[in-house]
Image (tube, rainbow, N blue to C red):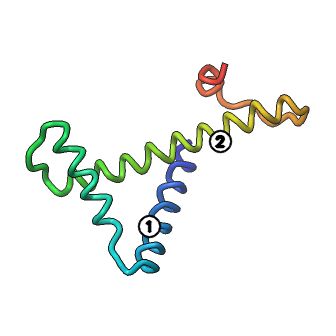
Amino acid sequence: LGSGVGLGVAGSAFQLALLSLTVGENLWVYFILRTTNFIAWLGFDRPEVIWVQALTVVSLATSSAVYLLLIHGVAWLLFDRIGHAIPAPPPWIAAWLR
């Protein structure tokens, strides 16, 4: 799970950088502004920049982890139904899927 999330975050960062170059705008600033608005909505007036950037990276990692678990869970269930067995997930993931 850790390496998959790391690759997902790295892939998202690469996509963000490539899209920023294509569009001609720094899209990381957009993510930072959205995160700052979310933190302000939670009730914190002026968060430090490091906390905003950390929460942005954590949100990317969380999104990547949810995507990773969802794709692998659906693949495990579908391949089992069509008769193509794949290795079972770890017990803590299998408990969520049952």
Judge from the rendering whether residue 44 lies leftward or rightward of residue 65; answer left or right.
left
Where is mark 1, residue-wise? 16
Query: Any mark on residue 77, and which?
Result: none
User: Residue 96: x, y in percent?
Assistant: 59, 22
Q: In which quarter of the image is the N terminus?
A: top right
In percent of width and height, residue 4 lies at: 57, 49
Q: In the depicted view, which residue is nearer to us: 1 or 35? A: 35
How crowded pointer 2 is (Cα within 10 Å; few <14, some 14-19, many 20+) is rated as: few
The residue at the point 28 percent across, 65 percent down is 29
| SS under mark 2 | helix
Q: What residue type is labelled 1?
A: Leu
For image coordinates 85% across by 29% down, the residue present is 81
Label 1 Cα crowd, 10 Å radius (few <14 / some 14-19 / many 20+): some
Report whether 23 appears left or right of 31.
right
Residue nearest the viewer, comparing 93 with 33: 33
Q: How many labels does the image show?
A: 2
Dot placed on the residue nearer the N-terminal end, 2 or 1: 1
Q: How far apart are marks 2 and 1 (CA)?
A: 22 Å
Q: Is residue 72 above or below residue 29?
A: above
Q: What residue type is labelled 2?
A: Ile
Say whether marks 2 and 1 touch (CB < 8 Å).
no
Which of the 4 image quarters holds residue 90? top right
Give the residue at the far right of this rendering.
Answer: 83
Residue visible at 53% across and 54% down in the picture = 8
Q: Where is residue 61 in the image (x, y as percent from the top left)?
A: 44, 48
Q: Quadrant of residue 77?
A: top right
Q: Mark 2 highlights which residue?
A: 71
The secondary element bearing badge 1 is classed as helix
Q: In which quarter of the image is the C terminus?
A: top right
- Above or below, 96 against 61 in this view is above
Residue at 50%, 67% (x, y): give it. Answer: 15
Q: Indicate the position of residue 10 as horizontal and vertical percent values.
A: 49, 61
